[in-house]
Amino acid sequence: CSAVEQRSILISIKTMNLSAALSLLFIASAEAFAPTGSARASTQLLAGSNQNPFGNAQSLEYTGGADPENEKNYGRLAEKLNEADIERRKILEEADRRERAAEIRREERLAKIAYMNDMPDSTPAGTVDEFMFKEGVQDQLDKLDHDLVGLLAVKKRVKEIAALLVLDKMRRKLGFETAVPSLHMSFTGAPGTGKTTVAVRMGQILAKMGYARRGHVVLATRDDLVGQYVGHTAPKTKEMIKKAMGGVLLVDEAYYLYNAANDRDYGQESIEILLNVMENNQDDLVVAVAGYKDRMDKFFSYIPGMMSRIGNHIDFPNYTADELVKIAGVMSRDLEYDIDEDAYATFKNYISARMELPFFSNARTVRNAMDRARMNSAIRTFERFAINGENGGVCTVADLKNISSEDFQILLDDILNADTDKRIFA
């Protein structure tokens, strides 16, 4: 061979040696990273026409193994995947349900609009009197007139609210759009001016008109709503709200819920709960707050959110002496007593004198006076027939029902003859 051919042969031999060396290196590396005998059983190379979706080449498939942890991990993974699939299916079903509900509402809305457009303006809607008497609203207004003397402005406001509810129900019957009006109320006035009585009547009117499930009235004060330590206020407030649901919650002297001088007072928590309920549950609960007008105005200035949620502000003025005399007559009628005609003048003198003294409470003072007059009548009748033996000790029905001027004169004498600092107890 020539020198050139010999040189080519040497280069070929060196290249073959290098390739062999690299092949041995690759084989050694593959053996170093190959799985052990126990782990090698975990996977097997499968060849088949249906094993690999990408062709007929070999694919990897888990077939278990000797390590029990592998089975546990595989089971947990399967459970998680199954749970995720169920959760995803629930989400899709809920989305479909909401979409169907929205579609139904849209169809009903379009049908209602078409119905209202096709309805002639002359379609009879019924008479107001029919709704007033059928629903029992007029009966409640008559009872309000019967039970309360005076308070013409208050009665007028109650009748206005009742008129709104009646006309709203007539509109609803025809298919008009309606919305529950703001029925939360504020009653301001001195004690004994009829705030609780009006609240009871309003609750019954709301129940008759379908704006309250039960129409009852729950009276609450600060002691009923505010706790004495951290975590005590919320349960107390929610318990009172639960009792009042379906009716009226009347918070008397509501300004005591807020103490501006103490930032840590628990009353603020109760107010926040009430505000939330007034906003979110106004279709099932009417909240009425009551108290002196000047203090209630100050309370509203501290809690503007309360003021904005109340749509009906009713002020209860003090009664006049003549109105208080009429209230005494109403009380005697309800208690089945007969007041002598000349006794009314004596009672008016007494009540006029009592109005000049501190702690006067309008109808409550009249009620206390009537209780004392009944006691004086009982003492007088007992002395006549039991002690003195008048008419052989036999008294008539008229004697048992009678309240005379003498019974009221004792009350007036107590005021006129008592010491100045003791007159308020007369």
Image (spheres, rainbow, N blue to C red):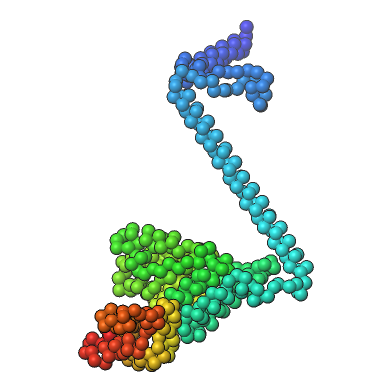
Q: Is residue 29 left or right of residue 164?
A: left
Q: Is residue 64 above or below residue 225?
A: above
Q: Can residue 367 be seen here?
A: no
**x%, y% of residue 191?**
38, 80
Taking depth in this image into account, of 409 and 397 the one nearest to the observer is 397
**x%, y% of residue 275?**
45, 67
**x%, y% of residue 422?**
23, 86
Q: How many marks?
A: 0
Residue most extreme to the top: 1
Residue most extreme to the front: 392
**x%, y% of residue 417?**
24, 91
Taking depth in this image into account, of 294 and 50 the one nearest to the observer is 294
Q: Can residue 350 be seen here?
A: yes
**Residue at x-position 51% and y-position 32%:** 79
Taking depth in this image into account, of 103 and 146 the one nearest to the observer is 146
**Residue at x-position 40% and y-position 69%:** 219
**Residue at x-position 32% and y-position 83%:** 391
Q: Is residue 196 above or below residue 81?
A: below
**Residue at x-position 70% and y-position 72%:** 125
Which image quarter holds the C terminus? bottom left
Rendering quarter of residue 6 = top right
Rendering quarter of residue 374 = bottom left
Q: Is residue 387 left or right of residue 64?
A: left
Rendering quarter of residue 1 = top right
Taking depth in this image into account, of 356 and 268 the one nearest to the observer is 356
Q: Is residue 70 above or below residue 321?
A: above
